[in-house]
Amino acid sequence: MFLLYFIVRKLFDQFDPSSIAQFTEKKLLSLKVNGNLLLSEPKLRAIVENAKQMLKVIKLSIQQPPSIVANCLWEAEFSGGCKHRQA
């Protein structure tokens, strides 16, 4: 199990969201262990999408006061969007 952690960490570029957010289709489909995809294709796509969203939150947290970021996260969770979003 411990070895699998290091394999996954290497496959996902040390869990760096800026790197994961840029994964191409080819890179996604190359994430294999022993010849098998590490996870299902939809799960792999979700990981890339989550990395993209995480980068948006990081960018927002740099640009806005903490209270705005907290409100935005709350709104995104319960109303499906954030009215404080920057274009």
Image (spheres, rainbow, N blue to C red):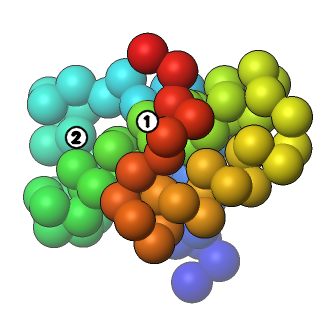
Tell me where residue 32 appears, x and y as whole percent: 25, 54
Work out which quarter of the rendered image holds the C terminus and state it: top left
Q: Is residue 38 visible?
A: yes
For the point 43% across and 35% down, the residue is: 52
**SS category of the residue bearing label 1:** helix
Tally the marks. Answer: 2
Mark 1 vs mark 2, CA separation in Å: 14 Å
Tell me where residue 28 appears, x and y as whole percent: 22, 40
Tell me where residue 50 appears, x and y as whole percent: 42, 50
User: Residue lying farthest front?
Assistant: 83
Q: Which residue is mark 1?
A: 52
Residue 61 in the image: above or below residue 72:
above
Which image quarter: residue 74?
Answer: bottom right
For marks 1 and 2 on the same chain, the one whose residue lies earlier in the sequence:
2
Q: In the image, what residue type sits under mark 1? A: Lys
In-front residue for pair 73/47: 73
Residue 21 in the image: above or below residue 6:
above
For the point 52% across and 21% down, the residue is: 86
Tag shown at residue 28: 2
Number of residues whose C-alpha sits closer than 10 Å to that of mark 2, classed few (under 14), some (14–19) or many (20 or more): many
Could you tell whether 45 is left or right of 62 in the image?
left
